Image (cartoon, grey):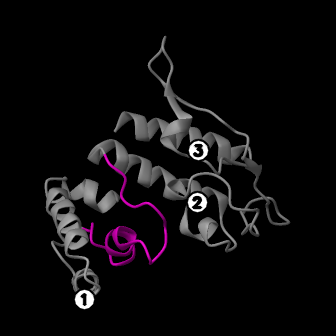
């Protein structure tokens, strides 16, 4: 909780200075040896956030190239759509938080072809409700596609998510 809170504080600081990190992955997060504070590194792909005329509101950024690790990218960056830099960094925070809590990644690529992404993110299979219709449909599609092992893996992870607090599932 403290690490994610600190990461969010770092992002608030960056946003106030008009910076979007673009590469929030576990490889770029370290603990300072003396203080134990979280440190965000590797600003090689960061960029300035554009502002509207009045300077108060962020605008969408046109695609700037796909750099970084697909696992940690927001879907709009992965698919080369216009994006809000702050929101895409927040998306990566959510996936990093999941990685810390669950000890594994939620998905490999933010695309509908990735069954885990399709089930947990697009169909909302990690939400507070035990199972929703969209998630059940995705599980059926996996089975129809012959992915019995994948279906079992996703179901095992979905069951493990029930051990998360309702607040944590809501956060994800």
* Labelled disc at residue 70: none
In the rendered view, would you say 13 is above or below 47?
Answer: above
Q: Is residue 107 magenta?
A: yes
The image quadrant where one finds the N terminus is top left
Q: At x 26% / y 59%, what residue is drawn?
A: 169
Mark in the foreground, 2 or 1: 1
Cα–Cα span, label 2 and label 1: 33 Å
Gap in Å between the C-alphas at discs 1 and 3? Answer: 42 Å
In front here: 145 or 98? Answer: 145
Position of 91 with respect to 52 (left or right) is left
Between the residue at mark 2 and the residue at mark 3, the CA separation in whole angstroms equals 11 Å
Q: Residue 34: within the magenta? A: no
- Report the magenta residues as a range: 104-127
SS at circle 3: helix
Tag in front: 2 or 3: 2
The residue that appears at 27% across and 81% down in the rendered structure is 142
Q: Which residue is mark 3?
A: 11
Circle nearer the N terminus (2, 1): 2
Crowd around label 2: few <14 · some 14–19 · many ≥20 (10 Å)? many
Residue with the mark numbered 2: 88
Residue 85 lies left or right of residue 136; in this view the side is: right
What is the secondary structure assignment of the residue under circle 2?
helix
- Residue 160: x %, y % from top left: 16, 56
> Residue 22 location, x and y as percent?
65, 51
Q: Position of residue 30 (x, y in %)?
A: 50, 28
What residue did someone put label 1 on?
A: 144
Label pair 1/3, CB-CB below 8 angstroms: no
- Marks 1, 3: nearer the viewer: 1
Q: Earlier in the sequence, mark 2 or mark 3?
A: 3
- Quadrant of residue 153 in the image? bottom left
Q: Nearer the viewer, residue 86 or 139?
A: 139
Left or right: 59 in relation to 33: right
């Amino acid at each position: 909780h403290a690490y994610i809170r600190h990461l969010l504080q770092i992002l608030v600081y960056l946003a106030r200075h008009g910076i979007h990190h673009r590469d929030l992955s576990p490889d770029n997060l370290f603990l300072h040896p003396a203080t134990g504070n979280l440190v965000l590194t590797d600003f090689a792909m960061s960029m300035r956030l554009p502002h509207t005329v009045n300077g108060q509101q962020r605008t969408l950024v046109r695609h700037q190239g796909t750099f970084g690790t697909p696992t940690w990218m927001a879907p709009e960056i992965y698919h080369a759509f216009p994006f809000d830099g702050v929101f895409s960094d927040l998306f990566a925070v959510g996936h990093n938080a999941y990685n810390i809590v669950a000890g594994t990644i939620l998905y490999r690529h933010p695309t509908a072809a990735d069954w885990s992404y399709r089930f947990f993110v697009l169909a909302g299979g990690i939400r507070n409700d035990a199972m929703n219709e969209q998630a059940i449909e995705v599980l059926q599609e996996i089975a129809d596609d012959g992915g019995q092992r994948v279906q079992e893996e996703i179901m095992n992870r979905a069951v493990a998510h029930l051990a998360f607090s309702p607040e944590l599932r809501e956060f994800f």
